[in-house]
Image (cartoon, grey):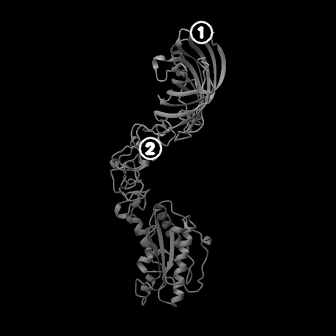
Amino acid sequence: MKHLIPNPRLLVLPLALAVVPLLSQAQSADRKTSIGLNVSALQYKGNYGSDYWNFSSNRYAPGLAINQYITKGLDLSLQGFYGELKGSQSASTYFATNLVNVNLGIKLKLNNGWALKEDAFIQPYLMAMPGWTYTSREGFYRGGRIDQDKSYFDIAAGAGINFRLGETVNLFVQTAQHAPSYANFDGDQTRDDNGWDDKFLQHTVGLNFNLGKAKDEDMDGVPDRKDKCPGTPTGVKVDENGCPIDTDKDGVADYQDQCPTEAGKPELQGCPDRDNDGVADKDDACPDTPGKPELKGCPDADNDGVIDQNDKCPNTPAGVKVDASGCPLDTDGDGVPDYQDRCPNRPGPASNRGCPEIKAEAKKRLQEATKYINFEFNKAVLLPSSYPTLDAIVQILNEYPDYTLSIAGHTDSKGSDPYNLRLSHDRAASARTYMLSKGIPDARIESRGYGETKPIADNATDAGRALNRRVDFDLYLTGDPNSAEVKYGPEPTMPDIVIPTTPAKKATPAKKPTTTKKAPVRKATPRR
């Protein structure tokens, strides 16, 4: 029987062109199974002679291979081909034998990481590939028919080189020696005892294509085995190592980089900061001068919240409230800034620390008030004649809310010192109690007594003693030292003496006149 074998080169080329676009990577630890298409040149050696390495006598055979990755150094390869061997000694002695050959081989790869990297371009290997050979022989031996179909155990070994053409396909060349046990390809009946009379060489060239898909948990197109940045978010562009693209090489991946084309700082999401003030240049209104984040990167030397370039008062003390131009607030517009103004809501001259000055008329009434404050004899009980004067002082306090009133009580030298000291204290307190009853806040009136310690006249005369028996009234800016203490010093310690007094609520104030008139000057009633 005669089997026609088509030209194998016409089969391999269209198959390769059809398969290549469907595959993505060459066989590797990631894609462990591959299919190979190949064509072999078969060279016979037997009783008719040897065609080994005589490429003019080649018999071509198409073939297929299935390869399975085992380790870096080992593959398992199932190979098969269909071909024909021919030979002739004379017109009456010749043969034509068709072969179907299948081998299961162990491939020892030399690109196992010792001498060559696993993904090296040139990848040499050795193979041990036992198998099965089926022969279908036709021919004549010395004029007699020698047709026979028979199978043999094939002992084969080979070597080859794989060329890594990229990430899609490998090209390989391989030569293998096949020695089927006791095979008789040529029909010659004269056989050697060793059983190796007929054998053949197989020179193969082909393409291997990988099947399957590499494990890629983050779906970035880089297999986990090679991925140096596992867990990359879905959709992020990565490099060949599986790491997110970093165009400006600043250590911040483009998908996290707010300035992907300018090298910057990680803490600023990859944006540059020329003045190193912690504000990215894109957000910095003063990119070349260090400043504060809350002021868009602009400086504020006096820390008043107004940037230096807009600050008309650049040296404002710390903590002072300022206006939009950086100048201290002046609420009452008196030219004294609030932080220096003792009365920020009422205008006054700088000489009086921004507070209204007490008018001369008010000062005079306070000075003269001492003449019209009278008490019952040897008591701290106010006489009703004192009420108009105290009411006038209440009016002054209401006109000057930024001031505090100091009341200081004094006596003449008659009587014991402790008694006089207590009497002066209680009389000053009695005047204070009256004015508090008129609605003046407690904190705005202070009273104290000095007894006979601060005379203003000679106690040896009645006139002098009358002048020394007095109650002084002085206004001073709230917060300043007490005016009585400034004039007379601290109040002496009060003795444990009870001075008769009457609560202010029992006193009936005199009615105020309908018109403002000064009280008539009268001689003060002598009092003790």
Q: Which residue is mark 1?
A: 143
- In the structure shown, which secondary structural element does the residue marked by tag 2 occupy? loop
Contact? badges 1 and 2 (CB < 8 Å): no
Look at the image and tell me whether residue 237 can be seen.
no
Q: CA distance from mark 1 to mark 2?
A: 84 Å
Look at the image and tell me whether residue 251 can be seen.
yes
- Judge left or right: residue 528 versus residue 264: right
Q: Which residue is mark 2?
A: 251
Check the image and report above or below for 90 versus 33.
above
Q: What x and y, as percent, mark residue 158?
A: 54, 31
Task: Name the one closer to the observer, 187 or 111.
Answer: 187
Task: Name the one closer to the observer, 463 or 288.
Answer: 288
Q: What x and y, as percent, mark residue 256?
A: 49, 39
Image quadrant of residue 100? Answer: top right
Amino acid type at circle 1 is Gly
Q: What x and y, as percent, mark residue 218?
A: 57, 36
- Judge left or right: residue 67 versus residue 526: right
Residue visible at 40% across and 55% down in the picture: 303
